[in-house]
Amino acid sequence: MRIVLFSILFFALSGPAGAEYRCGRAKTGPEFQAALDAELSRIQQAHQSSEASHKAEIDLKSQALIEKGVWSEADRAAYFDRVANLPAFQAREIEKRDYGRYFPSEVQMAMTLGAANPRMGCEHAANAVSFLAKIAAASEAQWLLMKTEMPK
C-alpha cells in the first residue's frame, strides 16, 4: 500500500482543489486505511484525467499553430520555456514542492496512527488529503496559465 500512496504523490507533482477529508465512520484501522487510500486515489485519478485533458488541448493548439505556419518547433519550445519561467508559474511550482514535501509524512502518520485508532489518524489524513488537493490545484493553475499565454 505504501508504494501506491507514494505513486500518488509522484503523479500529483507533475488537480481537484477544495478537498476536505472527513474521517467518516471507520471503526477499525483497516477500514480507516481503506477509506483514506480510496480518497487519495480519487483525487489522483481526477488529477490524472485533468492533466491528460489539458495536455491534449495544449498539444492540439500548438500543433495547429505549427501547421498554420504561425509557429515552428523552436517557437513551441520557446513558448514552453517562457511559460515555465513566468513568476506565476514558478510560484505554483513552489507550492507543489512545499506541499509535496509534507504529504508523505502526513500519509505515513495517518496510516500508522489510524491503524491503531482511526480517530488518532484523522487529523493527519485530513492534512494529507488537503495537501494532495492543493498540489493538484497548483498544477491546474499552471495549465490555465499555459492556455492563457498561448497565442490565439
Image (tube, helix red, strand yellow):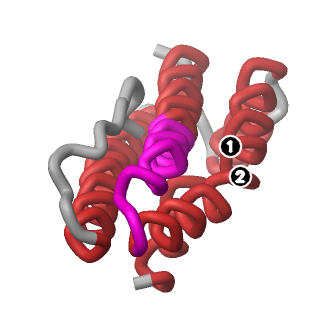
Magenta span contains residue 119: yes
Identify which residue, 24 or 93, lies in the foreground: 24
Q: Nearer the viewer, residue 47 or 128?
A: 128
Secondary element under disc 2, as helix, strand or loop, is helix
Q: List x then y, in percent, for residue 142.
A: 58, 30
Q: Residue at x 74, y 38 (%)?
A: 93
Residue shown at 50% from the left, 60% from the top: 110
Q: In the image, is 122 to the left or to the right of 80?
A: left
Q: Which mark is residue 114?
A: none
- Labels 2, 1: front one: 2
Residue that badge 2 annotates: 102
Instruction: State left or right for residue 88 relative to residue 112.
Output: right
Instruction: Tell me which residue sits at (32%, 59%) in the image.
Output: 36
Q: Which residues are magenta?
A: 116-133
Q: Position of residue 21 (x, y in %)?
A: 34, 38
How far across and how far down the image is residue 113, in percent? 51, 66
The amino acid pointed to by label 2 is Tyr
Q: Is residue 56 magenta?
A: no
The amino acid marked with disc number 1 is: Tyr
Q: Confirm whether residue 45 shows in the render.
A: yes
Residue at x 47%, y 54% (from the top left corner): 120
Tell me the residue that label 1 is attached to. 99
Compared with 45, 8 (above or below) is below
Tell me if label 2 and label 1 are in contact, CB under 8 Å.
yes
Q: CA distance from mark 2 to mark 1?
A: 6 Å
**Horizontal relation, residue 112 to residue 75: left or right:** left
What secondary structure do most residues of the magenta stretch adopt? helix
